[in-house]
Image: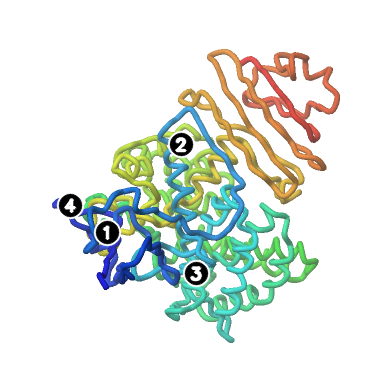
Amino acid sequence: GRKVTLRFAETLQSNGELATANLRDAKVTDVYTLKGEGEEVWQPSFTYHGFRYVEITNYPGQPLIEDFSGMVVYDDLRTTGHFHTSNSLINKIYQNAFWGVSGNYKGIPVDCPQRNERMPWLGDRAVSSYSESFIFDNANLYEQCLNNIEQSQTEKGVIPDVAPAFWKYYTDDITWPSTYFQVADMLYHQYGEVRPIKKHYSSMKKWVNHIREKYMDHYLIPKDKYGDWCMPPKHIELIHAKDSSRITNGTLLATAYYYHILRLMNKFAGLLNKPSDAKHYEQLAEKIRKAFNQKYLDKNTGEYDNNTVTANLLPLYFGITPDRYKDKVFKNMTDQIVSVYDKHISTGTLGTQMIMRGLTRFGRPDLAYSIVSTKTYPGWGYMVENGATTIWELWNGNKANQWMSSRNHVMLLGDLVVWLYEDVAGIRSDDENPGYKRIIMKPMITDSLQYVNASYHSIHGLIKSDWHKTNHSFHWTISIPGNTSAIVSIPSKSAQTIQENGENISKVKGVKLLKKEKGFVTLKVGSGNYSFKSAL
């Protein structure tokens, strides 16, 4: 008859009691009535808790740690990725990503596992789903996610911000529903799946038409709900930034994302052999691109709107920026990161979806590495330094108002894991031959990393990238699965210095020299295991 009570929380108050303010009105309480005979074993069957601490009341006798087991509960998905480097902070951040993602896989991808929410917010998963695909085999999960979105769509074409639409948040936002299109593209890129695109194309088309007909004004979309959600405020106690110089214009965000969606629809129409649709989306996108640049690009300074990092990053990354302004825009963006933000992250949910790849692929991988390596506010490293074991909802989650301070969210994961695999390890699928039928391998080399050991189990088999470097040489062991090929770019002074298993590559069967450029020698190789060595 004795009732044992267990209460759960992510953090403690200064007096050692549970801190539950960030759980809102979630009860997070289990009560078990003891039978009183022999050994009794119990665990909840119809709920779960996201927690680090449990308070036990009215336990019979002295509770011992071995009397309790913490059970990890998440969808039965195969772990497909492995990632480890010489940087212990990056390794910890990666582990936090793994732990946070798994904790939010509950039949649907939810935003958090602990408070009175646990909802499938679309904005949280746009590029996070892509990051997650390197860690887990999430193809089936996200095919079902697309079905949930389609089934939540209204007759007029409106897509909710949360799907399934438990809360019925039909706000006609642009950026959150863009997840519908971006997840479909992820499934094509990572798994070679055209089927989801074919299945959802008409629903996607309905949404695109609805937004164009209802909101487009001189080829701009003045409709945004969330902004660059949770960008780091200057004052660490705030939830949202209040400084206008840090806030990105909503119409700029909505229009840039709508342009990106049109480019995806152009791609999808091409895959489905719908040439008239493809032409329509291409022409509409071009009109939007011109209007966007006319409205927001200062041709003298190369700044977009108020020159936030996100305002410059989105048009640059989405291909809106004219070629002749790209260098200026990129320099404005990097100058902001360096001079204003001291090489720290300065983006919210939207900008963080492309910041690491954007910096690296436009020529500043060193800056991307600085952002991930910093241990001070704001950044993933700051979370680690302050005890995080997952990814927080806020960059300043330990200091801001605890009403909105989940310690396990994935929305600020952004493209970090994509960047770790595709750029740092150098494992990327060729979009022209998706699903890793052809693999693009080009590792990001920095003075601060001595080695990277990574692997990814693609639909064709295991891909490995294991590199280490000295002051004068680069050593790289790779594995290419059967029935695939790879374009491999090796850091090297010249092709003459590259050996494969002790033999110059010119003498190795199945290795073809393609080009030499900017410190890399690019080869084409077939399936198999290779051990390269080059002079730096």
Point out the residue furthest to the front here.
Answer: 37
Residue 165 makes an appearance in the image: yes
Amino acid at circle 3? Ile
Q: Is residue 361 visible?
A: no
- For marks 1 and 2, give the CA distance: 28 Å
To which residue does mark 2 refer? 91
Q: Position of residue 391 (x, y in %)?
A: 40, 51
Q: Earlier in the sequence, mark 2 or mark 3?
A: 2
Q: Residue at x 46, y 55 (%)?
A: 72
Chain-order first, disc 1 or disc 3: 3
Badge 3 element: loop
- Residue occupied by mark 1: 239
First along the sequence among labels 1 and 2: 2
What's under tag 1, amino acid-wise? Ile
Residue situated in front as seen by the camera: 513 or 12: 12
Identify the residue under disc 3.
174
Q: Answer whether labels 4 and 2 touch (C-beta < 8 Å).
A: no
Which is closer to the viewer, label 2 or label 3?
2
- Which numbered disc, 4 or 3, marks the residue closer to the eye? 4
Q: Residue furthest right?
A: 509
Please indicate whether residue 394 sits to the left or right of residue 279 in the image. Answer: left
